[in-house]
Image (tube, rainbow, N blue to C red):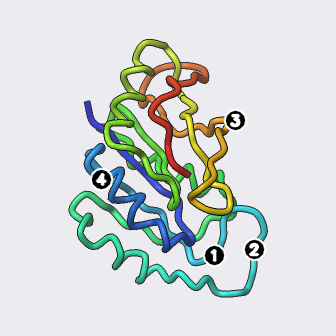
Amino acid sequence: MKKLAFCILHYGRPYFKYAVEAIYPQVDKIVIFYTDRPSQGFGTDIPCPDTGKDLKDDIAPFMDKVEWIEGHWENEGLHTDAILPYREGFNWQIRFDSDEIYPEGSVDAYIKEAEKTPCKEFRVPMYHFWRSFKWMCIDGQWPIRLYRIGSGDGLGWVKDQPRVFH
């Protein structure tokens, strides 16, 4: 079973290295789609303080599994869909954001749970830190982060544990 992870990236330097470090041992390949312009929400002419070079340098120890793609996408949907040509040869795809930490073994736990259903896309459970690392909220609207490649239909939810730290 081959697992592909991807991240759409514009900023997030304080946590990005830790997000990559957490997902790195759980997948076979990581594709990072970096843009120097926002693809989510509203655009701006203000340059982002997190440069692509800085972000890429931060994950240098993990580059043996990383493919770094730079580009511009008009919206989040197009930015996310950039992964589609890279999926061949993989069975599962997991999306992570620059500030999402996947606990050890979580990807395999989610896949094990997902394999019990015919669904194609799956929502994963998250804890959201609120204003500090002292307070966490349990997300009742789990984001879609796990995708079965090549088969399946519909949307499912994986088990409640372990939760992604966000």
Assign a secondary structure to mark 2. Answer: loop
Label 4: which secondary element: helix
Label 3 CA crowd tier, 10 Å (few <14, some 14–19, many 20+): few
Question: Which of the two labelled residues, at mark 3 and mark 2, occupies the earlier sequence position?
Answer: 2
Above or below residue 39? Residue 44 is: below
Q: Which numbered disc flags the more N-terminal residue, 1 or 3?
A: 1
Q: Give the mark nearer the N terminus: 2 vs 4.
A: 4
Using the numbered discs, state the Cα–Cα distance from disc 1 to disc 3 in whole angstroms. 27 Å
**Is 164 rendered above or below residue 110?**
below
Mark 2 crowd level (few <14, some 14–19, many ≥20, 10 Å Cα):
few
Question: Relative to residue 87, is residue 128 drawn left or right?
Answer: right
- Which sits earlier in the primary sequence, circle 4 or circle 3? 4
Q: Which residue is mark 1?
A: 37
Q: Amino acid at mark 3?
A: Gln
The disc placed on residue 43 is 2
Q: Earlier in the sequence, mark 1 or mark 4?
A: 4
User: In the structure shown, which secondary structural element does the residue marked by tag 3 occupy?
Assistant: loop
Q: Position of residue 101 (x, y in %)?
A: 45, 52
- For label 1, count other residues whose C-alpha is less than 10 Å away and answer few (under 14), some (14-19) or many (20+): many
Q: Which residue is pictured at 59% across the width and 56% down the height?
A: 134
Judged by depth in the image, the label closer to the viewer, 1 or 4, is 4
Q: Amino acid at mark 1?
A: Arg
Q: Are marks 1 and 2 in contact (CB under 8 Å)?
A: yes
Q: Which residue is mark 3?
A: 141
Contact (Cβ within 8 Å) of mark 1 with mark 4:
no
Q: CA distance from mark 4 to mark 3?
A: 26 Å
